[in-house]
Amino acid sequence: MTPVMFWLGIGIVLFVLGLHGVLLARQAIRRIIAINIMGSGVFLVMVALAARGEARDPVLHALVVTGLVVAVSATAFALRLATAAQAGDKKASEPKA
Amino acid sequence: MALTDWVFDGVLGLLVVVLAVAVLYARTLYASIVLFIAFGLLLAVVWARLGAADLALAEAAIGAGLTGALLLAALAQTSTTPFAEQRSAHWTRQRWPATGLALLVGVLLVRSLVGLDRMAEPGLMDAVTQNMADAGVGHPVTAVLLNFRAWDTLLELVVLLLALLGVRQLATKPLVIAAPWALLEAWSRILAPLAVLVGGYLLWRGSNYPGGAFQSGALLAAAAVVLRLNHLLPPVRWSSWGVRILVLLGVAVFLTVAIFTHWLGAGWLNYPLPFNGLLILLIEIAATVSIATTLTLLVVGEPDEVRA
Amino acid sequence: MTYALISLLIPLLTALVLLLTGSRRGVWVILASALSLVAAAFALLSVMGSGTQYLALGGWEAPLGIRFHLQPVAALLLVFTALIHLLVAVYAERSSHSQTRDTDYWPLSSLLHASLAALWLSNDLFNWYVTLELLGLVAVALVTLSGRKAYGAALRYLLLSLVGSLCYLLGVALLYGRYGVLDVTLLAELTVADATTQMALLLMTLGLMVKGALWPMHLWLPPAHAGAPTSVSALLSALVVKGPIFILWVLWAKVAPPELAVSAGWLMAVAGVIALISAGWSAIRTPYIKVLVAYSTVAQLGYALLALGLLLYWQEPELEVALWLFIIAHGLAKVSMFLAAGEMQATIGTKRVAGLKGATETMPVAMFAFAVAGGSLIGLPPSGGFVAKWILLLPLFAEPAHWPWALGVLVGTLVSAAYVFRVVALAFDRADPVRPDFVPDRFAQWLALLPALLVWGMALISQPLIQWLTGVSG
């Protein structure tokens, strides 16, 4: 086994763990965290692939930088939406209670 | 490869996985978030280990730092009932099918990756190396981001803008900021200018060494957030002209350069040679300002009007 | 190529200007999409004249840089996007029921237009990831415009969309790791049928199916599309779900090695037939008007999936014509249907299908638009939907071995007829019509009718259109 294969494997483990978390978590925030772990797995696969040669592949590194920014943007929106949705649910259920 | 390297890699990899499991299955949401921040920092070590210094910086600033702050902010707004915190509550009934599916995906993925590590696929590395002379910057990752694949980066700035616009549509409560703690306030007066300095340095350095607009923007945003939380900065609102200009500056400058390069004949985003370094720097500065403002608004932005 | 760039730039710049000035006037967006439509039409003309064109962005040739690829289908989709955005913008500006007043609808819809244009033009696997993410975020932001009640559906849409993007991105990483290029045209020459390629394509397909709400990944669509403001529902159903289908088509028809495409094609075709029938069944049973229309989108996407699947299964590029005619006919018909349904729902004051009782008397034009659009969805001649279905059916009738597929299409047609006639029959029940809460808006109703008439008009130009599409495919 090469170090690259080792890190590829870890990346896949993270992806699969995240997927499992997304499928099973109930709270929206937990799902968002699980999605971020999935994302880390994908990024790890990309960075490990970049480390195959003597020099590091700058294209893959740049793609991961882009991916990180996209991920944090989406996470920010999702978190605010999740809290707003929860507040909405509470408001909706208040008159009944 | 030396045995010590293997031990280091092995321990690091194992730790990452253990932390991920702990994050996902932690009993309380708070524990989960704190562990997630630790996970992000550890990941930054992994990137450094794999020779990706840009990513280590970006992960520490954006992945662990900013995402962590956003998660903690979301937690503060979420009043979790004790019911939701029970362990059984976050397991749904589809436990076994989901586990089976995840395992299947994992096995298929491992099978598809076998042999990929030994493939001597140069990728685009040669192409990047050959064209570095005309790239206008000395650092390959910056060259890819702002020159070779600049269109991606432009769209990515729009993605960031859209996250802000999306948040703006939501009817959210105004931010409540507790009175600052005296020591914290004193510290922030020192920390903030330091962050601005380091941010500026990261941006400048980014053209030749790891670092760049995103890492620097995230740092500047962190400084702004600290200042805002200590009441050293007035409330930031989308409704003020200045803020809007700062947020839109990055995309606007990028697009202006793109349009002018196309119009004046060189081609869409084709920087004319003697000025390419200068144009890239201009775009980077504008992008940094926009990223910093947008991230600040995402964390401590005030809703501008009360919407029904 | 410059025209295509202008068609992409106009909505993007419009969005920036609107955001900067804080203007909430629709006039500028209407003007901008009209200009964008003109530019797109010129782009289409130039493709018809001189064929497929490439533009290396930043002057960096592939594989290093990103290329725009203006192919006939992309040019057609540019025109289609601008046209639909224009129609919906006029409706949103004019109708009092569009639920988009005092919101950021205008810059967001312009950004949606720009993201789609960027998607049609792109020829790069990773750039598609960014455009898909753009499209997902803007679509979710638009859904939230209808207020708190839509937040739950919007959140589910966003989370699933993010999982879909990550699956897609992992697929891209595998393909890049295996072949070392991201440019689609270059990749198409390299691919071989091995485990890595297969898994990458599988992951990307799963991700795209989630984003495109293709059966069985469609469950998020009905609440999200039905809960959004009416003009947003129309944009989402007519345009947004088509983006992932476009990428799916490029991936499987151009990039995938034929060995893999054949078996995947069979699966897609089967999923398409199931979508047609099961989503149609849900549309028959739902009590809500807009949910019915949203389920009809899932069912109609089944046709597109079937066309794509059979195209791959039999390796017959001619079926591309059927695929794109479906996409365009469905887009026009669905805009009409959503606008009519939304207008009737808001005017009559109920979300339930039962409220449409006697609607032919109270809102005749809107109901007519609904029925005419429904006719095209069912595939009644001589509508655009009929032409598309006819091209799909021709090879199905040719050989007895293909008859089971034809049977699937037939059952699907009957199911679509059932949910359209369910509404139409109720609307003709004039004995005791439900009285509207508001005075019906005549202009908005005619506006809803316009795309439905266009889709029937498609039949008139179907001959040259089919010939042209057949000429450029394969």
Image (cartoon, coloured by chain):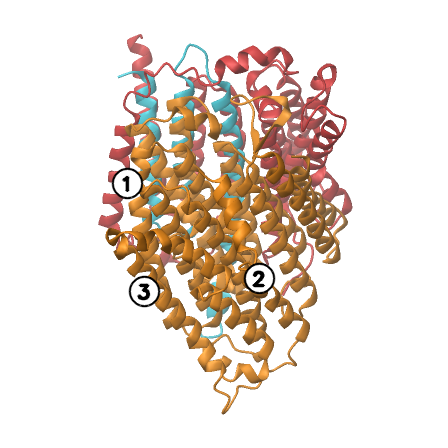
Chain colours: A cyan, B red, C orange
What chain letter is assigned to the residue under label 1?
A: C
Q: Nearer the viewer, residue C266 or A21?
A: C266
Residue B71 in percent (x, y) is at 49, 44
Q: Amino acid at mark 2?
A: Gly
**Nearer the viewer's eye, disc 3 or disc 2?**
2
> Is residue B183 visible to the viewer in this orientation of the structure?
no
The amino acid type, in three-letter code, at marker 1 is: Ser
Image quadrant holding the N terminus of chain C, namely: top right
Label drawn at residue C457: 2
Q: Earlier in the sequence, mark 3 or mark 1?
A: 1
Q: Is residue C219 above or below residue B250?
A: below
Q: Which mark is residue B36?
A: none
Q: Residues within 10 Å of mark 1 (few under 14, many from 20)?
A: some
Residue at 66 percent across and 58 percent down: it is C89
- Horizontal side of residue A21 vs C222, given as left or right: left
Q: Position of residue C4 (x, y in %)?
A: 64, 39
Residue B304 image offset from top left, x and y in percent: 69, 54
Mark 1 falls on what kind of element? helix
Distance between the alpha carbons at the discs numbered 3 and 1: 24 Å
* Residue carrying label 3: C411
Residue shown at 51%/67% (left/top)? C373
Quadrant containing the C terminus of chain C in the rendered view:
top left
Q: What residue is rendered at 49% in x and 56% in y?
A: C154
Verify CB contact (< 8 Å) between mark 3 and mark 1: no
The residue indicated by pointer 1 is C263
Relative vertical location of residue C253 with respect to residue B215 in this rendering, above or below: below
Query: Residue C163 vs residue C265: left or right?
Result: right
Q: Nearer the viewer, residue C245 or A65?
A: C245
Q: How many marks?
A: 3
Judge if badges 3 and 2 mark residues of a common chain: yes
